[in-house]
Amino acid sequence: MDAFKIVTDEAWHAQFTYEVLRSVRNRTRIAPVFPETPTFTSELARIHEELPSQIRGLDEMLFAIVSETLISSVLDELPQDKRLPEGVRDMVADHAVDEAKHHSYFSTLLRFLWPAMTPRERELAGPYIPRLIFAFLEPDYISTALGLRAAGLTDDEVEQVVTDVYARDKVVDGIRRGAAPTLQYFVEAGALEHGATLEAFQETGLII
């Protein structure tokens, strides 16, 4: 029953986000500047294709757990940003209330899922978990560049801004902080007791 409610919540999130985007576009007469495919969607597709066939699909469940247990600063910060229209702030605040419930559900799900996986499934899937975390939390550089170009910056200026703002050390540090709750859940489930999984977390900088 809880899972059905989450599906309903997520459909509503998609609907009201679309409605706000359409409203902004209609009022400003400015079309959104987005790539055809978000970067994280492309990365998830690559991971899905790379996975051995016997565990393909498990990545989707693990990504749901990752994405629903990460703490996004956007949900905390945007509702407090008085520069934004009230409708946008209310939309994000409403989203945050639902996500808190989803967080509890998926953190509990992980405690059942990981022990239920076979040793072979853990060996194959575990090292991909850091990539799933990065897929969700790493900045969308392409969208940023498109937005800066639309604002009138030259290609050289866009490159300079992206390089300055998204220095790799800063990006990894921000992802590590945002992923802290999720990482703790995987620790509690026993995922990092698996050598290859632990090594993957260390190599990406999620564990120092």
Image (cartoon, helix red, strand yellow):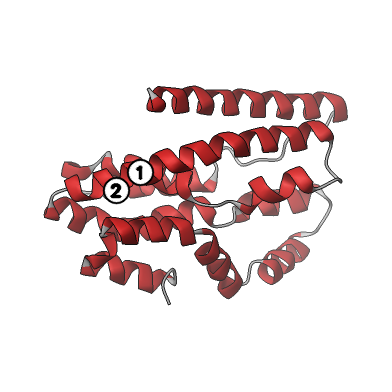
- Residue 34, quarter of the rendered image: top right
Image spot of residue 132 (x, y percent)? 40, 52
- Residue 202, quarter of the rendered image: bottom left
Does 36 sit left or right of 180 as displayed? right
- Residue 111 - label: 2
Of residue 18 and residue 145, the one placed in the foreground of this image is 18
Q: CA distance from mark 1 to mark 2?
A: 5 Å
Rate crowding at label 1 as few (under 14), some (14 to 19) or many (20 or more) other CA atoms within 10 Å: some
Q: Residue at x 85, y 45 (%)?
A: 82
Secondary structure under the numbered disc 1 in the rendered image = helix
Image spot of residue 90 (x, y percent)? 74, 33
Q: Give the amino acid at mark 2.
A: Arg
Quarter of the picture containing the C terminus is bottom left
- In the rendered image of this protein, does residue 137 appear above or below residue 38? below
Does 94 sit left or right of 8 as displayed? right
- Residue 108 - label: 1
Of residue 100 and residue 13, the one placed in the foreground of this image is 100
